[in-house]
Each structure stands twice: as structure tokens, then as C-alpha cells.
Image (cartoon, rainbow, N blue to C red):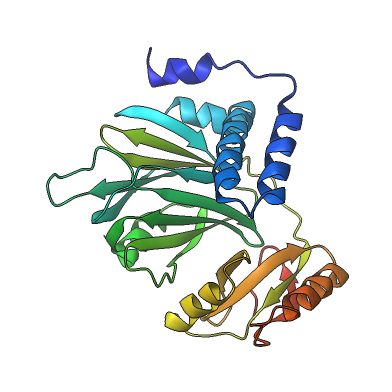
Amino acid sequence: MTGKERYENIEIPAQLPDVILRAQQKAAARKSSSRVIRYASSLAACAALLLIINIPTVANAMVKIPVVGTIVQVLQFGDGGKITDGVTVGSEATENTLKINFSTDEQDQANDAPSYNVEHKEAPNRVLFTFSGARYMDVEKVKADFMTQPLVKDVYGSMILDDSSVGFVVVLKEGVQYAVTEFKNPGYLEVKLTSDGKPVTPRKVYSLRTESMPFGESMGIIKESYPDEDISFLKTSTGEFTAVIGEYPTAEEAEQKLKELAQQPDYHEEFYVDSWMSNENPK
């Protein structure tokens, strides 16, 4: 059966919304257990697959994917890949498709994708990729490749102090949907972007953030200082970066989170509450 036929023959269960909600609740509620995190991520990935196929614009676009290799999974967030070491991360881009390649010293292209994690943030709309067991990535080439796509607003690297991990962030235009497909033999990721072209009304979000800083080790130090917090980095309107925690609809919720953070024994008062529109970068 071809990749196209596999997509077309997937049956959509009627209880899809409940499956997705339960998966997200389990992933959030059991973050303290690494074993359960892996379980919740797998469950969430399965729910994401069903969601993707149930979105006509994404499903129709994915039917057109030229299948090279074997499909491992399709997701919008979660983990995948296999444990590797010394992988080089490369990139290609064609027709709203972002392809992430992996190569080794022994062969031109790896058989499997390295261990990876995909996250999604909404304000602004962006996808965060992190690869473990990877030693090299040309961020400027990745940016140049992906910026050829009309649905991509920006691309920038992630600061990770672990020299065996690399990552980058893809900022998408408002309303753009995406699906990540993992392949093996050869191993690569394919990110399909779709948009119905309808305008999206921006909303105000409140977050905990730090002062702006240049791209560098200070970013990685902040992230490692709070291992239990979901810290991501946003490029500011001035081209620097800020560490961000949370995307809250009200200032009160953000203030409450700040109070909780301030109670940690190693808190150094780096964060404060700020707000910006969901389609903009903070100042």
C-alpha cells in the first residue's frame, strides 16, 4: 500500500476531541514522571495524527507528499527518532514543505532520525525543533532554505549548552497549520505547511519574560537554572532574545505564576510580567 493510500484509508473516530483533550491533560498533569512523560507524549502524538487527518487542508496537502522511505509517525508535538551520535542536521524546502535531513560520517544519509522533540507555541505561532545526538547544523542554511517559503516568517537557532544537541525555531504566519512526518530508511522529517488564507484576529497575551539579551550562553544558563519550567526563547523586535514562560490570557494569571516562581529557592528575579499581541514579537 502506498503512502497516499495509507493516508486515505485512515478511519476517523467520532470521539476524536475527547481523545485529544485527555492526551493533553495527561501530558500536563504528570510532567514530574519521566516514564509517564514518554507515555503521554506518545498518546498525544497519536491524537495529533488523528487531528491532522481530520483537518481537510492538512490532509489534502499530505496526500500529495512524495513518499521516499517508510513513514514512522505523523505528529504536531511530541517526541520521536532513535538514539544516535554525531549526526549532521541539514535542510531542504519546496512547495510549502520543509525537509530536515540527517547524515553521518559513515554514509550520506542516516537510516533513522535522531531523537527529537517538537513543541508548538502560539504567541507568535512557532514550532520548536530539538535534536539529540546531533553535533552539527548550519543554522544560516536552514534559515535560508526555510525562508524561501511564503508561510514562514522567521527562523532562528536555539541556544543549547549540551554540545550533543542542536535546535531551531520556525516562526509561521498567523493561521498556518503544520504536520510533521517522520521517515526511516532513509531517516528524515518532513514538515508540511498549509493555510486557508483566512485572517486571524490577534489577541493579547501575558507572559513571564526576562530583559532582552544577545544570542549566547546566557540564554542556555537561564534555561538550565529552571529545569522544571517550560522556558522558550523569543526573538524581540530589536533582534535580541528574551526567555519566556507561559502564554496567559490575563495579567492576573501571569502574576500568579510569577509569585509561584519567586518562591523557588534559586530564583534570581530575572523574570517580570509583560504583554504583547499574539502576532507580534515583544520589545
For the question of whether residue 67 can be seen, the reply is: no
Quadrant (top left, top right, bottom left, bottom right) of the N terminus: top left
Identify whether 31 is placed above or below 51: below
For image coordinates 55% across by 77% down, the residue present is 225
* Lateral position of residue 50 relative to residue 25, left or right: left
Comparing 35 with 6, the one in front is 35
* Residue name at image x 37 percent, y 62 percent: 166
Q: Based on the displayed image, in which of its 4 quarters is residue 64 positioned?
A: top left
Q: Residue 264: give x, y in percent of width and height.
A: 70, 78
User: Position of 186 compared to 52: left or right?
Assistant: left
Q: Position of residue 130 (x, y in %)?
A: 44, 57
Which residue is at 72% across, 52% downward?
A: 200
Quarter that holds the C terminus: bottom right
- 218, above or below 60, in the image: below
Foreground pick, 10 / 278: 10
Judged from this view, the residue extending furthest toward the right is: 252
Indicate the position of residue 21 as horizontal and vertical percent values.
74, 38
Marks counted in the figure total: 0
* Residue 247 can be seen in this image: yes
Q: Position of residue 186 (x, y in %)?
A: 26, 35
**Left or right of 3, for residue 120:** right
Seen in the picture, residue 213 relative to 66 is either above or below; the reply is below
Q: Does residue 181 appear to the left or right of 123 in the view shown?
A: left
Q: Residue at x 54, y 43 (%)?
A: 38
Which of the pair 205/24 is nearer the observer? Answer: 24
